[in-house]
Image: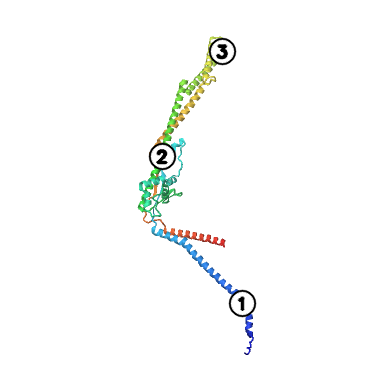
Amino acid sequence: MPDTIETPPQAPPKKEQEAKKSEAPKAPAYTIQKKFKKKLKQLNLAKKLKSALLRRQARRWFTGIVLIPWLLCALYFTLIASDRYVSEASFLIERSDSGGASMEGLSLFGITPQASNDQRILETFIQSPDMLEHLNKELNIRQHYIDSADWLSRLSPSASQEDFLDYYRSHITVHYDDTNGMLEMEVQGFEPEYTKQVTDQILLKSESFVNEISHNLANEQLTFVRSEVERAEQRLKDFTRRLLNFQNETGLLSVEQQGAALSGIMNELQAELVRNETELQTLTSYLNQNSSQVVALKQRIEALKAQIITEKDKLVDSESTSLNDLAAQQQELQLDLDLATQAYTSALVALETTRTEASRKLKQLVVVSSPYQAQDAKYPKVAYTLINILLVLLMIFALARMIRATIREHRD
């Protein structure tokens, strides 16, 4: 069998070898570039997915925080919320014209009319539990708050007295105007006619309260003045008794008149003494000292001197109570008696004046603007309320987003 000749493998063409040689070193760089492009596409896709997720999450947050609550509020205020009608009134408290002058007599006992803010007191009384109790007794206002309003605006049937008072205060506004001294009152109710009845009843009770307070004050002053009159009368009796006792003890009706009488007697004695001494000098000029006329005249002069000393001792005796001392004591007692008499007279005048004022109207409630029955509901203000709610919800949404972004940034 002839031997087969194996032909050696032929070498690849030269161009193919060069191409292979040129492709061999470029393979790794191409692979890296291809992987980088692939990863870049993945990152872009992740960013797009993340951005879409965040947008979707923001929409969910906006829907949950802003849109749904606002739509619920809009549904409530436009379809469910009960209308609240308003009745307004303006009034003030005035004193009677003679009210200030009638108290002048009381200043004798330290009583002066103090400038009290009657409007402030009345403002507090209108919002007090006493006024609420009166309204509930006359108009059954608690049942009105329960039955006439929607389920969200009404007063709870099981509300306590404190909750009832808070609910009442939230439906009545009393404002004191410093410029004109008037009280501006606004009463809210769920029925226009009933709201006006509540306002009228508040004004009636307020007027009764003002009269009661003024009369109570006048009665207290009357009681005080009566006690002062009794005390002044007792002082007058005491000083009168002291003066009578003094007169009985001294036996003198008037020490001053007695002193004037003694002074007159002393003046006469002094004049008589001077005349006798003059006559003595005349007689001794031509008669002997032992003559009967001279001796008699000397004896008369000595008697006059002794009498003058006696009468003078009655006025200014230092060893016993003199007439001057008695006069001073009687004058002091008489002065106390005069002062007590004046005080008693003034007390009687004040008592009569206060008694008159206690039986008349000292203060009165002047209604400047009478309450009226509303035709249109003033509350709720739907557009205004919904805009405010929307702004508040948007602020809450922005705050929540900011907090979440801050937390995510710290995590990253």
x 35%, y 46%: residue: 138
First in sequence, mark 3 or 2: give its number: 2
**Mark drawn on residue 284:** 3
Q: Is residue 217 above or below residue 91?
A: above
Quarter occupied by the N terminus: bottom right
State the scheme by which the image is colored: rainbow
Q: Position of residue 372 (x, y in %)?
A: 37, 52
For disc 2, the marked residue is 216
Disc 3 residue crowd, few under 14, some 14–19, many 20+, Cα 10 Å: some
**Mark drawn on residue 27:** 1
Q: Residue furthest bottom?
A: 2
x 49%, y 65%: residue: 56
x 53%, y 61%: residue: 404
Do the residues bearing badges 1 and 3 touch, measured as CB atoms within 8 Å? no
Labels in figure, total: 3
Viewer-nearest residue: 325 or 216: 216
Q: Amino acid at mark 2?
A: Asn
Q: Position of residue 92 (x, y in %)?
A: 41, 47
Quadrant of the rendered image containing residue 381? bottom left
Viewer-nearest residue: 386 or 67: 67
First in sequence, mark 1 or 2: give its number: 1
Disc 2 residue crowd, few under 14, some 14–19, many 20+, Cα 10 Å: few
Horizontal side of 258 relative to 23 (left or right) equals left
Q: Is residue 12 above or below residue 29?
A: below
x 45%, y 32%: residue: 343
Q: Amino acid at mark 3?
A: Thr
Residue 16 visible in the picture: yes
Q: Position of residue 213 (x, y in %)?
A: 41, 41
Q: Residue furthest front?
A: 1
